[in-house]
Image (tube, coloured by chain):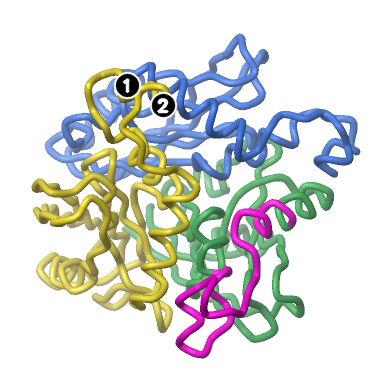
Chain colours: A yellow, B green, C blue
């Protein structure tokens, strides 16, 4: 069995934003020399997500408005008890649960085994500072 | 290490519907001859889900109504900017995020290592055409 | 390839509650003697979740109120058709979909490869009886 571990660091300049990381993950798969296996990609921060969906800017705007409706930003410690800690990111911890922490993708014949529109995104809900993403591939 | 890859194609005749695929996944595990490992099952389309829950029709009706409330179908490009592309499935991309893209199930002694009520479902949110599901098992 | 399988049983005395199981998972990784691999942790029950987020009690209170708003407890079979079966836990099957069934964590140099605040929680939505969690680690 082979394994390959890689970390990506990126900074989203806004509080909320989505970054297409598909090419970075494909590069990691190529470097791993793994032909058949599984590839885990996860946010290492708990106010961020990794998810798979469409590379379409209208949809990303829709996601932002929808997440803002389901878990609105509100620094008040009445709305989010989490903000009693002095933080203002209670909403971000909720948004991340909707979009998920991680994806697991099959690696087949040395490539991400994807349907026609699948793309991997990093979803940031408390940006403006460097965050890390983990890529771990195991297989043979 | 062994690996086994399989694709299922199915067509849900309605816009939204759930299909029990547990037997199909169990067959794939049997064919793989893997005794200990991990089994990934994911939708290859971005308006569909694979999830684990109860095989109970009342619950599935509840899920449909709930998802419709959280992300209602609306072809208008005002409600979903995604529909400016000419598509009408903006809602489906949201429903899929709630229900998830994939499941990872342990394989133990050659079988899916399940609790008493766990069953694997394909969740369709933009049906009426053939869609694919990927099964990838790795282990020994 | 090595594999290690472990089951945790626990009882949450309330209907809804969160239990930090990070130490239990770290112990399983240590016992497995796996240095590089993947670790799956999943609820074996369909009214429960395993998720990764912050070990902060205010946030957990926020999650409870939020989930209660998104999928309120209501034993009525009108609100949840699932409750026509005689059960009263329709809401719990919905809450579990928001929080997720499982997490997959990288194992690197013999340890859970975590960001600074990542902790693994069992989320119970229909407690007051023993429930099981599965840990499966594969790698080398």
Residue A85: x, y in percent?
26, 19
Give the residue number, with chain letter if any, for mark 1: C55
Marks 2,1: beta carbons within 8 A: yes
Residue drawn at the location 66% of the way across and 78% of the way down: B127
Location of residue A15 with respect to C91 vertically, above or below: below
Residue drawn at the location 19% of the way across and 55% of the way down: A14
**Which region of the structure is painted magenta?**
B65-92
Residue A115: x, y in percent?
43, 79
Location of residue B89 with respect to C64 vertically, above or below: below
Most foreground residue, B51 or A51: A51
Q: Quadrant of residue B130?
A: bottom right
Measure the alpha-carbon separation of dots 2 and 1.
8 Å
User: Is residue B83 covered in magenta?
Assistant: yes
Specify whether residue C137 is in view. Answer: no
Compared across the picture, whether A100 is left or right of C15 comes to left
Give the residue number, with chain letter if any, for mark 2: C121
Q: Quadrant of residue A105?
A: bottom left
Q: Earlier in the sequence, mark 2 or mark 1?
A: 1
To which chain does the residue with label 2 belong? C
Compared across the picture, whether C107 is left or right of B125 comes to left
Location of residue B26 with respect to B114 vertically, above or below: below
């Amino acid at each position: 069995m082979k394994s390959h571990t890689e970390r990506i660091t990126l900074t989203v300049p806004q509080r909320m934003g989505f970054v297409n990381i598909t090419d970075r993950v494909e590069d990691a798969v190529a470097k791993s020399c793994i032909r058949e296996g599984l590839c885990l990609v996860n946010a290492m921060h708990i106010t961020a997500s990794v998810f798979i969906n469409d590379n379409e800017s209208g949809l990303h705007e829709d996601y932002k408005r929808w997440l803002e409706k389901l878990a609105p930003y509100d620094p008040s410690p009445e709305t989010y008890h989490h903000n009693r800690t002095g933080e203002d990111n209670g909403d971000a911890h909720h948004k991340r649960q909707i979009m998920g922490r991680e994806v697991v993708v099959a690696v087949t014949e040395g490539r991400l085994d994807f349907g026609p529109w699948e793309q991997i995104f990093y979803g940031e809900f408390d940006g403006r500072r460097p965050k890390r993403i983990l890529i771990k591939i195991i297989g043979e």
